Amino acid sequence: MIKNVLTLIFLGAVLISCNASKAQKINSVAQLEGTWELDYISGPRIAFDGLYPNKKPTIHFNVKENQVSGSNSCNSFTGKLIVTGNKIDFTQPMAVTKMMCMDAQQGEQVFMSTLPKITSYDVTDNGKTLNFISGDIAMMRFTKK
Protein backbone atom coordinates (compact mmCIF):
# COMPACT_ATOMS: atom_id res chain seq x y z
CA MET A 1 0.00 0.00 0.00
CA ILE A 2 2.78 2.42 0.91
CA LYS A 3 4.57 1.58 -2.37
CA ASN A 4 1.42 2.45 -4.32
CA VAL A 5 1.05 5.80 -2.52
CA LEU A 6 4.71 6.64 -3.07
CA THR A 7 4.43 5.67 -6.74
CA LEU A 8 1.38 7.93 -7.17
CA ILE A 9 3.16 10.83 -5.46
CA PHE A 10 6.23 10.33 -7.66
CA LEU A 11 4.16 10.17 -10.87
CA GLY A 12 2.23 13.26 -9.82
CA ALA A 13 5.45 15.16 -9.23
CA VAL A 14 6.80 14.09 -12.64
CA LEU A 15 3.62 15.20 -14.43
CA ILE A 16 3.60 18.55 -12.66
CA SER A 17 7.25 19.20 -13.52
CA CYS A 18 6.65 18.28 -17.19
CA ASN A 19 3.76 20.73 -17.43
CA ALA A 20 5.80 23.47 -15.74
CA SER A 21 8.61 22.91 -18.23
CA LYS A 22 6.21 23.19 -21.19
CA ALA A 23 4.70 26.38 -19.77
CA GLN A 24 8.15 27.94 -19.48
CA LYS A 25 8.97 27.15 -23.13
CA ILE A 26 5.70 28.57 -24.39
CA ASN A 27 6.21 31.66 -22.26
CA SER A 28 9.78 31.98 -23.59
CA VAL A 29 8.53 32.05 -27.19
CA ALA A 30 5.83 34.57 -26.23
CA GLN A 31 8.56 36.87 -24.90
CA LEU A 32 9.86 37.30 -28.45
CA GLU A 33 6.64 39.04 -29.53
CA GLY A 34 7.10 42.64 -30.65
CA THR A 35 9.84 44.83 -32.06
CA TRP A 36 13.48 44.79 -30.97
CA GLU A 37 16.32 47.19 -31.87
CA LEU A 38 19.91 46.01 -32.34
CA ASP A 39 22.45 47.56 -29.97
CA TYR A 40 25.37 45.10 -30.31
CA ILE A 41 26.72 42.79 -33.00
CA SER A 42 29.93 40.75 -32.77
CA GLY A 43 32.46 40.19 -35.49
CA PRO A 44 33.14 43.37 -37.45
CA ARG A 45 36.18 45.46 -36.67
CA ILE A 46 34.19 48.63 -37.32
CA ALA A 47 32.52 50.39 -34.40
CA PHE A 48 28.77 49.76 -34.05
CA ASP A 49 27.93 53.42 -34.78
CA GLY A 50 30.10 53.23 -37.91
CA LEU A 51 28.14 50.23 -39.19
CA TYR A 52 24.79 51.88 -38.48
CA PRO A 53 25.31 55.66 -38.62
CA ASN A 54 21.69 56.66 -39.36
CA LYS A 55 19.40 53.80 -38.40
CA LYS A 56 19.86 50.69 -36.28
CA PRO A 57 18.50 47.35 -37.51
CA THR A 58 15.24 46.13 -35.99
CA ILE A 59 13.54 42.77 -35.85
CA HIS A 60 9.84 42.15 -35.29
CA PHE A 61 8.35 38.83 -34.18
CA ASN A 62 4.72 37.90 -34.79
CA VAL A 63 4.55 34.68 -32.80
CA LYS A 64 0.88 33.94 -33.62
CA GLU A 65 1.55 34.07 -37.38
CA ASN A 66 5.05 32.52 -37.17
CA GLN A 67 6.47 35.56 -38.99
CA VAL A 68 9.69 37.51 -38.55
CA SER A 69 10.31 40.86 -40.23
CA GLY A 70 12.32 44.01 -39.75
CA SER A 71 14.88 46.38 -41.16
CA ASN A 72 18.57 45.66 -41.63
CA SER A 73 19.24 49.43 -41.33
CA CYS A 74 18.40 50.08 -45.00
CA ASN A 75 16.21 47.36 -46.46
CA SER A 76 13.23 45.52 -45.08
CA PHE A 77 13.13 41.74 -44.68
CA THR A 78 10.45 39.19 -43.88
CA GLY A 79 10.36 35.44 -43.46
CA LYS A 80 9.05 32.47 -41.55
CA LEU A 81 9.69 32.29 -37.80
CA ILE A 82 11.01 28.87 -36.79
CA VAL A 83 11.30 28.50 -32.99
CA THR A 84 11.45 25.40 -30.79
CA GLY A 85 11.98 26.16 -27.12
CA ASN A 86 14.95 28.54 -27.08
CA LYS A 87 16.25 27.31 -30.45
CA ILE A 88 15.69 29.65 -33.40
CA ASP A 89 16.40 29.15 -37.09
CA PHE A 90 17.10 31.95 -39.56
CA THR A 91 18.52 29.71 -42.30
CA GLN A 92 15.34 29.75 -44.40
CA PRO A 93 15.35 32.26 -47.29
CA MET A 94 13.88 35.67 -46.48
CA ALA A 95 12.36 38.24 -48.80
CA VAL A 96 14.51 41.40 -48.76
CA THR A 97 13.96 44.72 -50.50
CA LYS A 98 16.86 46.03 -52.62
CA MET A 99 17.18 49.78 -52.00
CA MET A 100 20.62 51.38 -52.39
CA CYS A 101 21.98 52.77 -49.13
CA MET A 102 25.61 53.76 -49.40
CA ASP A 103 26.08 54.67 -45.74
CA ALA A 104 24.54 51.43 -44.41
CA GLN A 105 25.78 48.90 -46.96
CA GLN A 106 28.45 47.23 -44.81
CA GLY A 107 26.25 47.16 -41.69
CA GLU A 108 23.41 45.68 -43.72
CA GLN A 109 25.66 42.87 -44.98
CA VAL A 110 27.00 42.14 -41.49
CA PHE A 111 23.47 41.94 -40.06
CA MET A 112 22.09 39.68 -42.80
CA SER A 113 25.13 37.37 -42.78
CA THR A 114 25.04 37.02 -38.97
CA LEU A 115 21.35 36.02 -38.73
CA PRO A 116 21.77 32.53 -40.30
CA LYS A 117 24.54 31.76 -37.79
CA ILE A 118 22.15 32.19 -34.84
CA THR A 119 21.11 28.91 -33.19
CA SER A 120 19.33 30.03 -30.00
CA TYR A 121 18.09 33.05 -28.10
CA ASP A 122 17.71 34.26 -24.54
CA VAL A 123 15.39 36.98 -23.23
CA THR A 124 16.79 38.69 -20.11
CA ASP A 125 16.35 41.83 -17.99
CA ASN A 126 12.67 41.11 -17.34
CA GLY A 127 11.90 40.90 -21.05
CA LYS A 128 13.86 44.02 -22.08
CA THR A 129 16.92 42.38 -23.70
CA LEU A 130 17.06 39.75 -26.43
CA ASN A 131 20.34 37.92 -27.06
CA PHE A 132 20.96 35.91 -30.22
CA ILE A 133 23.46 33.13 -29.63
CA SER A 134 25.55 31.00 -31.98
CA GLY A 135 26.64 27.84 -30.18
CA ASP A 136 27.57 29.41 -26.84
CA ILE A 137 28.66 32.84 -28.13
CA ALA A 138 26.36 35.88 -27.89
CA MET A 139 26.43 37.33 -31.41
CA MET A 140 23.70 39.99 -31.31
CA ARG A 141 21.87 41.92 -28.60
CA PHE A 142 18.57 43.76 -29.00
CA THR A 143 16.50 45.95 -26.71
CA LYS A 144 12.71 45.98 -26.66
CA LYS A 145 11.16 48.96 -28.43
Image (tube, grey):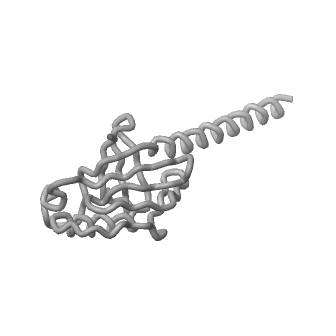
Q: Is residue 112 left or right of residue 6?
A: left
* Rendered position, 36 above or below 8: below
Picture coordinates of residue 50 (x, y %)? 13, 60
Q: Nearer the viewer, residue 65 or 101?
A: 101
* Rendered position, 139 above or below 102: above
**Who's the residue at 50% across and 54% down the image?**
67
Picture coordinates of residue 24 (x, y %)? 54, 40
The quarter holding residue 22 reads: top right
**Who's the residue at 53% across and 40% down the image?**
27
Q: Is residue 81 left or right of residue 126?
A: right
Q: Nearer the viewer, residue 120 or 95?
A: 95
Q: Is residue 85 left or right of residue 72?
A: right
Picture coordinates of residue 111 (x, y %)? 29, 63
**Who's the residue at 24% across and 69% down the image?**
100
Q: Nearer the viewer, residue 117 or 93?
A: 93
The quarter holding residue 95 reads: bottom left
**Who's the residue at 15% across and 64% down the image?**
103
Q: How many marks?
A: 0
Picture coordinates of residue 26 (x, y %)? 56, 43
* Rendered position, 111 above or below 32: below
Q: Quadrant of the N terminus?
A: top right
Q: Nearer the viewer, residue 43 or 75?
A: 75
Q: Quadrant of the C terminus?
A: top left
Q: Is residue 79 left or right of residue 11?
A: left
Kindly give the residue lying farthest to the front in the view shown. Answer: 99
